[in-house]
Amino acid sequence: MTGTDRAPAAVPLEEERPGYARRWWVLATMTVCMLVVITGNTILNVALPTLQRELGATQGELQWVVDAYILVFAGLLFSWGVIGDRIGRKKVLLIGMTLFAVASTFAAFSDSAVELILWRAVMGVGGAAVQPTTLAVITNVFPPGERARAIGVWASANGIGIAGGPLLGGLVLQHFWWGAVFLIGVVICAFGVLAVLLVVPESRDPNPRRLDVPGVLLSIGALAGVVYGIIRGGSGAGWTTPGVLVPLVGGAVLLGVFVWLQRRSSHPALDVTLFRNPAFSAAAAALGLNFFALQGATFYLVYYLQGVRGYTALQSGAALIPVAVGMAVMGPRSSALAQRHGPKLVCAAGFVLVGASFAGVQLFEVASPLWLLVVVFSVQGLGMGSIFAPATESIMSVVPREKACAGAAVNNSVRQVGGALGVAILGSILTAAYRAELGSTLDRLPAGVRRQAGESIVATLESVRRVVAGADADAGRVAAAVAQPAREAFVSAMHTTALGTAACALVATVVVLRWLPGKRRPAG
């Protein structure tokens, strides 16, 4: 390793520490690496209706296609953070990118929903190595005076990946089969690995912690139990049945044991003492609630766009462009606004906009004008883009530089847990509300297709299509009459679910106003 490849040596006062000479090239590289794991998840959103048709996946399996990645990702973030602090963040980046590319390749050629869920979980292992490490590297190579700006760029690209992934997925699905959405990540991984080898300096914690294997297993088990119970309960299994209560209660118990052990461990997977700092806790809650709204809302809005309005995958991805634009506009600007007015005000304003956007979803109907969608999605993007950078900087400013990987792991884990719960909870609310709104409408369909038809609007319309295409003309005419009531039932169910999302934004507003720091007073 040459002299230019080494991170600058530490000095007693962090403010005097110069930045790494090629830090802006490093930032560009970290952005590419981060976009791999972000788009690897969000690019799948517009493909979900296609997967439901071509793989015969149930609504619950589709939620697991999303959440299997997120849960493993969240559960291993702490471990990869510790490993990065110990063996070097550059090495962990290369390991994660390679594993992500291999798993993506196998996911592309899956023959069933179960096989796809498995490979999505393996993708989560690689993604967990990459995303927190990118933030840790940025924190390490940038001096404090430039760090907020760099994190703002990183957060902005993060938001673009989240909202722009569906557009990319739509473009791919327009010309190729559904598996191709995973192969895009393989190509980007190749460029990312090359860039990491060329410009990223190696860095590590001089006093790394040991890996807490029991803590990792407990965290994954706890989250999986809670999410499984929520998804199964929302699928109509009944919230008081053993199949729902056992995983829910068991997951909650494991979560309590996990926290109890972390408080007493000399090398915890999660340093729970960080949460004693109100600013850290509030910022973590803000990120978690923001991703709860974002991931959960994207899950049901794609079904609205493709199922109710009849958009193609490309058209539905394009309809979400205003969200990406809003995030791109506000991502870097929110850092400057937070320095001027304080993260409390900026994040609170962001959540007010987020809440307003989901209140605006109440105006969506089966044939709402396009301009209404553009306005609501733009407000959503502006609001969410106002939260990422200030909340992230608030978290990372509390964590010492040498523990940057661990701090980044906490930052990313609360986002992923929030996203997983958003898909599970809001997806379950949507499914339950849709079935309730349908009522006896599905009785017009043959008995053999009724249960699966109630899974989602896409499943309903696909069942109608099959019956109409069948030999029985009378049954086909009766089934065709189901389509419009089903669309109206889904819109009503989406209104109910969007109210839950708006309530989440309201709670987040209260949290940041109460505990997030305000404007910093100048020294002296």
Image (cartoon, grey):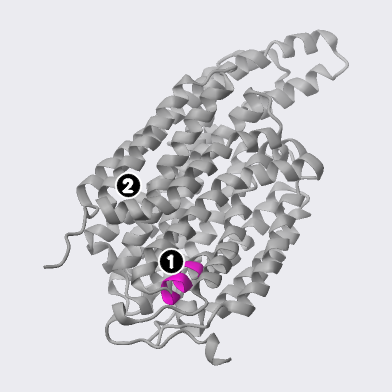
Q: Earlier in the sequence, mark 2 or mark 1?
A: 2
Q: Is residue 472 above or below residue 187?
A: above
Q: Amino acid at mark 2?
A: Cys
Residues at marks 2 and 1 touching, judged by CB atoms closer than 8 Å: no
In the depicted structure, whether residue 204 falls above or below residue 106: below
Foreground: 6 or 104? 6
Q: In what element is the residue under mark 2?
A: helix
* Dominant secondary-structure state across the stretch colored magenta: helix
Q: In front of the other: label 2 or label 1?
A: 2
Q: Which residue is mark 1?
A: 409
Mark 1 Cα shell of 10 Å, populated few (<14), some (14-19), many (≥20): many
Q: Position of residue 396 (x, y in %)?
A: 35, 66
- Asked if residue 137 is among those painted magenta in the image, a careful observer would answer yes
Seen from this angle, which residue lies furthest left? Answer: 524
Q: Is residue 469 above or below residue 107?
A: above
Measured along the vertical axis of the image, is residue 134 above or below residue 466? below
Q: Which residue is mark 2?
A: 347
Quarter of image, res 275: bottom left
